[in-house]
Amino acid sequence: MSLPLMPKATAVWLVENTALTFEQIAQFCGMHSLEVQAIADGDVGVGMMGLNPIANGQLTQEEIARCEADENAELRRNVTDLPALMPRSKGARYTPMAKRQEKPDAIAWLLKHQPDLTDAQIRKLIGTTKNSIDAIRNRTHWNMANIKARNPVLLGLCTEADLDKAIAEAPKSLKRADAAFDVEDADEE
């Protein structure tokens, strides 16, 4: 079972506002019963604002009443139907200044080792511009003499999962592009 949000503050609220045993509160908050007893005695958490687990949807009043009536019952967290928070996956990512000078190295590595990737996939993966990719491909980049092809995953510019996903999608996009050219050629004949 996962712990409640801010377990110590939740324990403070439960001690002050319920008749639950120390063991019940400790089990729910992931603490030792002596810690909960210290909160009740005022040795720990003095001046700490309690966090109401009913208000933030972690418990219901009925669940607290059920456990107050039976000392051996364990508090069960309220199961929510809200979807879990997902990490942000779209949009521009911030690249630290120290990493920005390594982008041309990553582009060179991708062009050399993964020629199937489209420019759009490289731009999305590394967070660079089409002009930078073209300049490195045509060897006209202003710093071409110092560019060494290095893996973007090892440089920290993308994750291995993102790179594998882009590589898996690359053949599909090339087949679509080839099919488009075949249709154009057929139209011209």
Image (cartoon, rainbow, N blue to C red):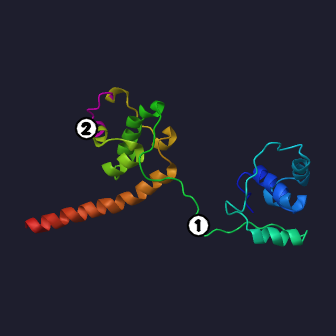
The secondary structure making up most of the magenta span is: loop
Q: Secondary structure at mark 1?
A: loop
- 10 Å neighbourhood of mark 2: few (<14), some, or many (≥20)? few
Tell me: 54 left or right of 185.
Answer: right
Residue at image location 43% in from the left, 53% down from the top: 90
Q: Is residue 106 left or right of residue 142?
A: right
Query: Between disc 1 and disc 2, whose residue precedes?
Result: 1
Q: Nearer the viewer, residue 5 or 117?
A: 5
The question of residue 109 being in magenta is answered with no
Q: Amino acid at mark 2?
A: Asn
Q: Is residue 66 above or below residue 6?
A: below
Q: Quadrant of the C terminus?
A: bottom left
Q: Secondary structure at mark 2?
A: loop
Does the magenta segment cover residue 137? Answer: yes
In the figure, 140 relative to 118: above or below?
A: above
Which quadrant does the N terminus fall into? bottom right
Q: Nearer the viewer, mark 1 or mark 2?
A: 1
Judging by the rendered image, the residue that carries numbered circle 1 is 82
Label 1 sits on what residue type?
Answer: Leu
Q: Which residues are magenta?
A: 135-143
Where is residue 128 drawn, in percent x and y?
36, 41
| Disc sitting over residue 138 in the figure | 2
